[in-house]
């Protein structure tokens, strides 16, 4: 069956450091992968989309990579700030439907 | 959240009662979705609709029902047949014309069945 796995443990990092989150998938051949941010008690908010033919995508302090051979996407938050504390979800897109991972909770300490 | 309203934010019901969750959007988006989120789990798709008067089951449709009589509205009914209804329910929309566009999520409704 199809499966999406993200870092199973929460990530606690010091302000200014880089957070690296992992999204692995099996039995999928997604053409696109999206990353969302979710704050407690709120709906997810879209951050980035990366296509299968793109190795890397950047948006401000965020960087996403997509390796279809490894079936993995990495999400980096550089120069992290306490305001980056949230849960980050990866989602695979197929036929206008998204399948989500469970998310990784990031806490940035001041 | 902008443009998508879910009400109420918190909802309490007794076991065995049906309950309807509201989702209204003013984004003029064609597609609408209902997800359920449980602690430690990803969002799971309940139902989706790509056009008015049409909807399809998602991965966990059992115990739920929907209607799409207007473009702006996609209410979800949690029936007494749903065995574990306590969860955080999220409504989302998508423009529908470009598959790459992101989904827009509402603020969610937290349902607690006592």
Image (spheres, rainbow, N blue to C red):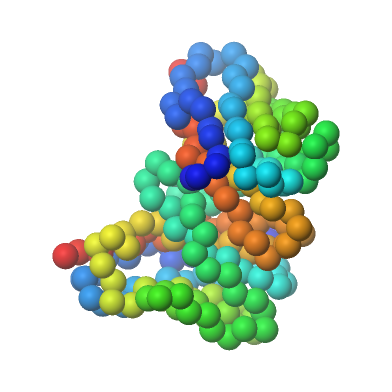
Viewer-proximal residue among B25 and A35: B25
Q: Image point 75% across, 42% down: which residue? A: B49
Q: Decide: is A79 above or below B104.
A: below
Give the percent coordinates (x, y) of residue B51: 80, 42
Whether residue A25 appears in this view of the structure is no
Q: Image point 74% across, 54% down: which residue? A: B96
Q: Image point 20% across, 64% down: which residue? A: A109
The answer to whether B51 appears left or right of A4 in the picture is right
Give the percent coordinates (x, y) of residue A26: 65, 69
Give the percent coordinates (x, y) of residue B60: 68, 40
Q: Residue furthest right?
A: B54
Whether residue B1 appears in this view of the structure is yes
* Quadrant of the image occupied by residue B59: top right
* Quadrant of the image occupied by residue B90: top right
Viewer-proximal residue among B106 and B44: B106
Q: Image point 60% across, 33% down: which residue? A: B23
The answer to whether A84 appears left or right of B112 in the picture is left
**How many labels, in total?**
0
Q: Residue furthest left?
A: A110
The answer to whether A77 appears left or right of B20 in the picture is left
Viewer-proximal residue among B70 and A55: B70
Give the percent coordinates (x, y) of residue A72: 56, 76
Viewer-proximal residue among B76 and A9: B76
């Amino acid at each position: 069956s199809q499966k999406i796995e993200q870092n199973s443990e929460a990530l606690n990092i010091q302000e200014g450091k880089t957070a690296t989150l992992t999204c692995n998938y099996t039995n999928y051949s997604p053409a696109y992968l999206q990353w969302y941010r979710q704050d407690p008690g709120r709906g997810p908010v879209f951050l980035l989309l990366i296509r299968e033919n793109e190795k890397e995508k950047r948006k401000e302090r965020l960087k996403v990579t997509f390796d279809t051979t490894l079936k993995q996407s990495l999400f980096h938050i550089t120069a992290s700030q306490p305001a980056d504390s949230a849960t980050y979800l990866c989602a695979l897109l197929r036929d206008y439907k998204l399948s989500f991972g469970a998310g990784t909770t990031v806490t940035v300490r001041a | 959240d902008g443009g998508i309203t879910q009400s109420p934010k918190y909802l309490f019901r007794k076991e065995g009662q049906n309950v309807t969750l509201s989702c209204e959007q003013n984004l003029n988006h064609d597609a609408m979705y209902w997800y359920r989120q449980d602690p430690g789990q990803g969002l799971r798709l309940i139902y989706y609709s790509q056009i008015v008067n049409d909807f399809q089951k998602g991965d966990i449709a059992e115990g739920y029902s929907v209607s799409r009589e207007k473009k702006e509205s996609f209410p979800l009914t949690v029936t007494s047949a749903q065995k574990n209804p306590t969860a955080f329910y999220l409504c989302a929309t998508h423009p529908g014309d470009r598959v790459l566009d992101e989904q827009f999520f509402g603020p969610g409704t937290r349902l607690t069945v006592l």
